[in-house]
Amino acid sequence: MYKLYYSPGACSMSIHVALNECGQPVVLEKVDLSAPRPAEFLKHNPRGQVPTLIDGDQTLREGAAILLHILDKHKSPLLPQSGAARDSAIEWMMVANASLHPAYARVFFLKKNGVTEGPLMNAALEGINKIWSEVEQRLSSQSFVCGDQPTIGDILLTVMANWSVPASLGPNTKRMLKAISSRPSYQKAMQAEQVEYKAAA
């Protein structure tokens, strides 16, 4: 059985949803990111970051690597097995993980250091909204970011859209967010993590 170190609603939630999509039971270990990390957790991840996944005697510590591991191992349709469809799914997983996530992190850093407005905050928010604008444009002609079927990119985007940042989410984006957050796998994760979904409203 898997063990997932997570923080409610954080990027680790995408791992939780992916495991639910694959029908895999998981032991959840909550990590308080505002407090010193427990020594037991730091044994598994000295960086003290979530997500951290334990699969038997293997420990994985990076979100994208964990998702590839799970979805390939269980042959999930969220990550096609080959060809252009797989390339597109990985691309949008990385857009969320390597572009949108750091964009949000810049806003969180500024807020943590007392910056709530001004040119730095405006630039950070512009970086977020530039990506959401691209998402909105793609969704004007298709149901999900990679076409008519959801992929892991949609899961990640749905998790991040719910973070406490005033992002500009268009109607097509909100339609996708509602479709993903309504999936049984997502609802199950929200219930377990005690997260309320507001971004699709």
Image (cartoon, rainbow, N blue to C red):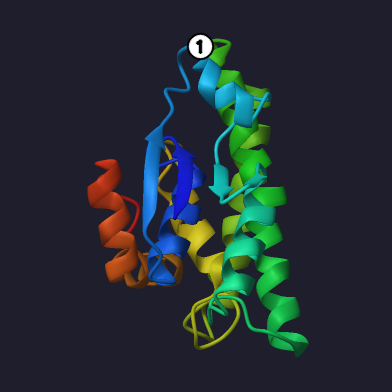
In the picture, residue 105 is in which quadrant?
top right
Question: Does residue 91 sit above or below 47 in this rendering?
Answer: below
Residue at 56 percent of width and 46 percent of height: 54
Question: Does residue 118 sit above or below 17 in this rendering?
Answer: above
Measuring from the top left, give residue 28's x and y in whole percent. 38, 42
Residue at 66 percent of width and 67 percent of height: 92
Horizontal arrangement in the rendering, residue 20 relative to residue 197 (left or right): right
The residue labelled by disc 1 is: 36
Element assignment for label 1: loop
Horizontal arrangement in the rendering, residue 37 relative to residue 26 (left or right): right
How many marks on residues?
1
Measuring from the top left, give residue 65's x and y in whole percent. 69, 55
Residue 201, visible in the rendered structure: no
Residue at 28 percent of width and 51 percent of height: 190
Identified by mark 1, the residue type is Pro
**Quadrant holding the C terminus:** bottom left
Residue 151, visible in the rendered structure: yes
Measuring from the top left, give residue 123's x and y in whole percent. 68, 34
Question: Does residue 42 sit above or below 157 in this rendering?
Answer: above
Measuring from the top left, give residue 3's x and y in whole percent. 46, 46
Residue at 77 percent of width and 89 percent of height: 83
- Few, some or many residues within 10 Å of mark 1 (<14, 14–19, 20+): few
Horizontal arrangement in the rendering, residue 7 relative to residue 153 (left or right): left
**Quadrant holding the N terminus:** bottom left
Question: Does residue 38 sit above or below 168 in this rendering?
Answer: above
